[in-house]
Image: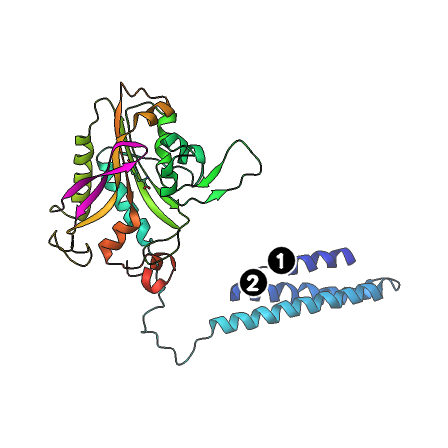
Amino acid sequence: MLKQLSEIEQEINSFSITVEDELESFRLKYLSRNGLLPKLFEELKNVSKEEKPLVGKKLNEVKRLAEGIYNSRKAFLEESLSVKEDADYTLPGRTFSIGTSHIITQTLREMVKIFREIGFKVTQGPELEEEFYNFDALNTPEYHPARDMQDTFYVQNKYDKEKKYVLRTHTSPVQIRTMMANKPPLRIVSPGKVFRNETVTYKNYFMFHQIEGLYVDKHVSMRDLKSVLGYFFRKFYGADTRTRFIPSFFPFTEPSGQVDVSCFICGGKGCKTCKETGWLEIGGCGMVDPYVFKAVGIDPEEYSGYAFGIGVERIAMMKHGITDIRMLYQNDVRFLEQF
Ligand code: DAH
């Protein structure tokens, strides 16, 4: 009988009681007058004298367990089923709000979509990047003064003394990775996070996003670059948007340019957003430097290419009139849910 009792004990413990019918089956099976436990009590008289105390004790234990489970489930079910008399059933149900994508994610998607429509493939690279891809292969060796253009987070690497790592300071290393792994023609955009060791202010943050573009083929010229970026900004800011290119310098492009778009707030007349200039600075661009082609094993006599890098935060902030970059990353729902 002891064995039977411990089997019943196990059964009782795993009996599922989530609705009233199950509660009643439980009662009928174990506790009612014809239930298992009262029956076993009757059989107790047939148990030998020596065994009786032990069996009796166990039987009582199991009975208490069954009653305990029964009462607590009963109370729980009654509570959850009880109908509150003052409830107003015409009230609308409780709702909870569904989150939205972050404004930067939304902006990135919108930008990527426009480039995809005109044949650009999307690629990504690592945020923890080798110095080689972030600088050297982009024609920025260690002694090059352009390394100071970007305040870099250097990362110590205890395991592999050969490789030096940085948090990538721009998305341009993806150009190198793409050109090393694939043969031209290449047409990619690469969105992602970049990091700079900058003092945080209303206009600078230690992390932000860029979207990199690269097109390599035979006979690619500056004209292609201008037309693609012009097309992109007309799509993004509206058909009246104009673009202009100003000479600039980047070690990995020759010639290099700064891309400006006509201020979409004032249409170029001059206002607070564009600081009365009529233009907004949006990114850098240029023709891929032959030194970069050499570093990745592409013959600069045969191929040419253009590249560009656009800052995503600036674009999103200007489009939505956000004046402090820190707001984007404070995760204040009252701010974020506006977009
Ligand atoms: N990587 C540059 C930066 O972060 C931006 C840039 C300039 C990207 C020129 C390019 C380029 O691809 O061609 O400042």
Magenta segment, principal secondary structure?
A: strand
Which residue is located at x 32 percent, y 34 percent? Answer: 251
* Nearer to us in this view, 41 or 304: 304
Residue position marked by numbered label 1 in the rendering = 14
Q: Is disc 1 surrounded by few (<14), some (14 to 19) or many (20+) residues within 10 Å? A: few
The question of residue 247 being in magenta is answered with yes
In the figure, is residue 304 to the left or right of 53? left
Q: Which mark is residue 261?
A: none
| Cα–Cα span, label 1 and label 2 | 9 Å
* Nearer to us in this view, 20 or 41: 20
Whether disc 1's CB lies below 8 Å from ligand 1 is answered no
The answer to whether 294 is drawn above or below residue 88 in the figure is above
| Picture quadrant of residue 40 | bottom right
| Picture quadrant of residue 58 | bottom right
In the figure, is residue 163 to the left or right of 220? right
Secondary structure type for disc 1: helix
**Residue type (three-letter) at the residue carrying disc 1:** Ser
Residue position marked by numbered label 2 in the rendering = 17
Tags 1 and 2 in contact by the CB under 8 Å rule?
A: no
In the image, the segment drawn in magenta is 241-262
Q: Which x, y percent locates residue 129?
A: 44, 38
Q: Residue furthest right?
A: 50
Q: Quadrant of the C terminus?
A: bottom left
The answer to whether 313 is drawn above or below residue 86 in the figure is above
Q: Which x, y percent locates residue 161?
A: 55, 33
